[in-house]
Amino acid sequence: MTSKDELPVYSNLIYLQGDLGNLEKLAEEITALTGLHVDDIIQQDLPDRCIVAFMADFNLEEILMEGNGLTLGSKHLIAKPVFNTNSILVNGLSEKVTVSSLKAYLKNKVPSWGGQMKSLEEINQDKQAVVYFERSIDADDILFLKQEFEIDGETLFLSKYFPCLSEVKFEAKDGFTPEIPLAITAVQKNLLRQIETKNKSKQIYHGRLRKVISLYSDCEAISSREQLNVSGVTIKNFGILEFLQRADGQELIGRIQEKHGCIIKVVPNPKMNLSLGGPGDSTKMTTTENSWKIRHLKINLIIGEIEKQTSDIIVITVNTALNLKVGVLAQIILSQAGEEVQRTLEKRYPKGIKLGEFAETSGGKLQTKHIFHACVPKYSQEVVQQMSDLLENLLARAEILQAKSISFPALGTGGLGFPLDIFSKVMLESIIQHSKLKSDSLQQIQLVVFPSDTEAAETIQSVFSTGFKEANAKLKGNVYRYGHIFLRIKVGDITEQETDVIVTGIKDSMNLASSGEVCNVLLEKCGKKLQDECNTKKTDLDLNDVTMTSAPNLSCQHIIFMNKDAFAPRLAQGIFKVLIEAEKLGATSLALPALGAGFHKKNITSIKQCIFQAVEAFGLLPTQNLRKIKLVILNAAILDDFLHHEGSHPHLYNKETTDTTMLPENISQEVDVHFYSIHALDRIKAAKELLEACKLAYKKEIENNVHLLSSIQIEELLKLCLEHFIIAKIDIKCGFLEMEGFHSNGLLKVKTRLKTMIEGASKRRTNIGIEWHYTQEENCEIEKTYQHEASSCKGLDTIGFIHDINFPGMTANGNTGTLSPERLNKSFYLHIHAQELWPKRWEPMLKTKNLKVVEVMPQAEEYSEVEKQFHLTLPDFPIKKLECIQNKSLYLQYCVKKKELDQYNPQDHQNEQKLFHGTMSDCIPPINENGFNRNYCGVNGTIYGSGVYFADKSSYSCKFTKPDLDGNRHMYRARVLTGEFIETNSSTKYLPKKPGTNRPYDSGGDKSRGIYAIFHDSQVYPEYLITF
């Protein structure tokens, strides 16, 4: 008798007997018939019997035909449940290891493995034994821990034993009733039978077979022989072919061939795709993909299973009652996501939903955040519009949830009868319509097609390729595309643009009235409030050459001013810096005037070169926010000069710019691998092992501080990566470089070069004494040449143009004409304005040094003050080390911002608080160097909006710390300008304006919980770092 907690049969296994044929084809036929995904096929002794293992539990009665059978095409197979078995098969007995010695060994070892052995019996003439256990769960647990072990130097192998797959008949044992053996037809053994059952014969056979095959130039010549069958798998990874052709890849293939007795051939041009996907398989290796782009949306056609997708949202079909036990796809979701999803549906939608509507739940145990349960109507001409409305509503809801990605199956194309071409066209039109809306979040849409449904894949591919070609063709005339950036050129007034940000130039005096036509219009429309705010920003403009203000009475949210005097000789660099600032701000759209053009055609060629170069350079970066840029021309007479700019400079990208990863065509991205062997299981096991080995060999590395590099250095890094077959993605906002590839030595070379670049950039960054108007890379070299009293040198600007600099005349000749380079002594400014600002407790610093981290001793007064606040809510966590962060530039901008809040907020209002921020060890260097910029937004969620979060309780911030390799955690005690507060939520990107003013609130969050969200980088200073 089995115990009550054990099932009498396996809930995901089924026994089949009959003409099985090719096992891969059998798996595909079973999946097509039942809708259940096959995970494995198990055979033991008899070729006409197998056990099919599914990836999810199922109801056997629902899939069996009359007479306990399964009909697949023209053949009928006997199908029965598989009873739990309490036995394990042991292979490898010999004269040295007998049944007696095995029994003695197991009797001693099995209890430590977590089971109770009942008996052991020798079977066959092949030196095998079956071990019986008290419970079937004991056998399962032991197989989980042990697949092989050694006795007296001999290796023995364990596997689950299914009596229904064996010729051996068993009698019932005491206390347990095994499965009743099925009727067996005697089969005369021949030479092939011996090869299949005798391990030694099998090894000899395959060893000689490999020698024979090596004489052929093409393995497929062998596949025509009856003894061998072939199956294939597609592996998709950047540089996969180059890896498999290298020495280490060839060694891997040879090892797998020897282990599984099969022949492996790598085919560069993919022809077939067999998905062996299991729960742990890599989607990148087992799916095929076609991609399209329309405006900001990227659409991928994925060959795979919807339940395995890792997008933020997946969509499935359900009935109006929202019963996930009805329908193949719904059943799979229920089995893998968990019962909690069904309970949520019943609780939220007790009356169900109507046709054309959808329900919403979490992703449960799946790797997705949300599941949309769509109720699709049965096809007729009348419901096509209903389907269209449903799709558009699903996309709109995804935007509201701030999802970045969503996955759709081919909705309604199964039992509901929607023709594939009609669904594809409706889906395409819905995506195109959605792309026209202002999108804050959704960037990727995936159409997921089951591997065996080639018709669906081909139809979607055809419809979408044609449709997107026509749609993208409409992006012409005055709209240009640079990567993911769309630049539109129009005639108009810059101050009337409804974008997040508008840009204009201003003189370093920050006097609107004397800074040109646009500034005069701004003064007229925005009034004295804008001029007053500009007066407080003069220091910021002097230090950074760019500053931002609010936009009183305008349709935009912010105005970015760039220093006309500083950027006159380097307009492209100035515009590029403005775009970076807008990206950091979180702006999605920006309006830019033709700076310097005015009502005249003077220098139009040079100006348009600079503008297009800056946008082009920005388009190369994988930014997250800014997508739309308007170039607003005030004078219609010069519009044509800007529209006809193609070919005006050598670096201009085509309107159909490729992806920022710049993958060359001569590096492989996928290969087919063919497996030749007698047994299907040998091929399946070999394929799985190769996939897993490739997955382990494919390395991913993430490096930070990339934001310190110039665009020229970033381009050098990308080229170096491609030389070593490494794909690189650079996030300029977060300062991350993500690299992946098979070439571990290449990764090391890139990391070494990156380290050298960052060290050099950091040194130049800390040298705040002298600045030339060239790249950080060039600045130091130009100054060295100048100090050596040389007459000239060459300088490379941030866009990539080389200038011949003449020091006596202070001129620079290059592609854009003759310029006047400036040599700024910023240390003089800091000495005059900031020498009295540094806290008295700071240790002395060199004038040329910007950052110094100083350990605070426990006897110091500041140590006691920080420790007391920290221990108010974390009394059981002793402080191991306290460090004071001395950063001149961060402290100076913090003081400027504090002065601004003290001026505008009510008198005696508490503008400053001392708050905590938990972090990880790898974030400490960039925070010490650059502060809490909004790069850290969203690292631990965005429940209070797109800001950086701080708390008055150390216990709350402790939740967001992670121990380093030494077990230490880290937390900042920062000075934070919370100013005037307003409650915010997850949808807050910008703080709203205070009533009756054009100034935004200073902080958000939840004051009742002591949590503050800061939306401006300069409102925080990382004063102390606590290690505990």
Image (cartoon, grey):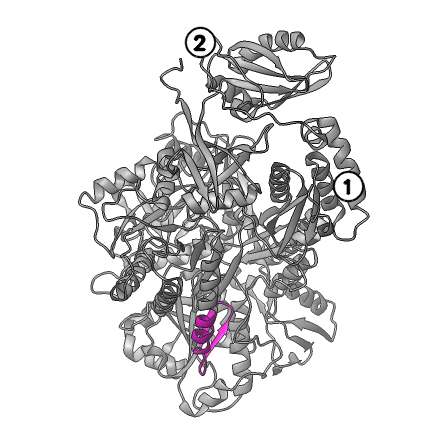
Q: Is residue 44 left or right of residue 356?
A: right
Q: Quadrant of residue 42 in the image?
A: top right
The residue under label 1 is: 210
Q: Give yes or no for contact between labels 2 and 1 (Cβ–Cβ under 8 Å).
A: no
- Check disc 1 and report its element: helix, strand or loop: helix
Which one is nearer the viewer's eye here, 800 or 889? 800
Q: Look at the image and say whether residue 82 sits in the magenta stretch.
A: no
Q: Quadrant of residue 8?
A: top left
Q: Is residue 40 above or below residue 575?
A: above
Q: Nearer the viewer, residue 953 or 314?
A: 314
- Label tally: 2
Residue occupying image coordinates x 74% and y 12%: 96
Q: Badge 2: how crowded within 10 Å, few (<14), some, or many (20+)?
A: few
Q: Is residue 486 magenta?
A: yes
Q: Position of residue 682 (x, y in %)?
A: 64, 37
Sequence-wise, which precedes: disc 2 or disc 1? 2
- Which residues, given as a range, are shown in magenta? 466-487
Q: Quadrant of the N terminus?
A: top left
Graded by Cα atoms within 10 Å as few (under 14), some (14 to 19) or many (20 or more), the crowding at tag 1 reads some
Residue 476, compared with residue 191, is above or below; it is: below
For residue 175, which numbered disc appears in the image? 2
Residue beneath the point at 58% across and 43% down: 22
Query: As shown in the figure, which amino acid type bears the numbered disc 1?
Result: Arg
Residue lying at 41% horizontally and 49% vertically, measured from the top left? 938
Q: CA distance from mark 2 to mark 1?
A: 49 Å
The answer to whether residue 806 shows anywhere in this view is: no
Could you tell me residue 176's position as x and y percent? 45, 12
Residue 843 to residue 505: above or below: above
Query: Which amino acid type is shown beneath numbered disc 2?
Result: Gly
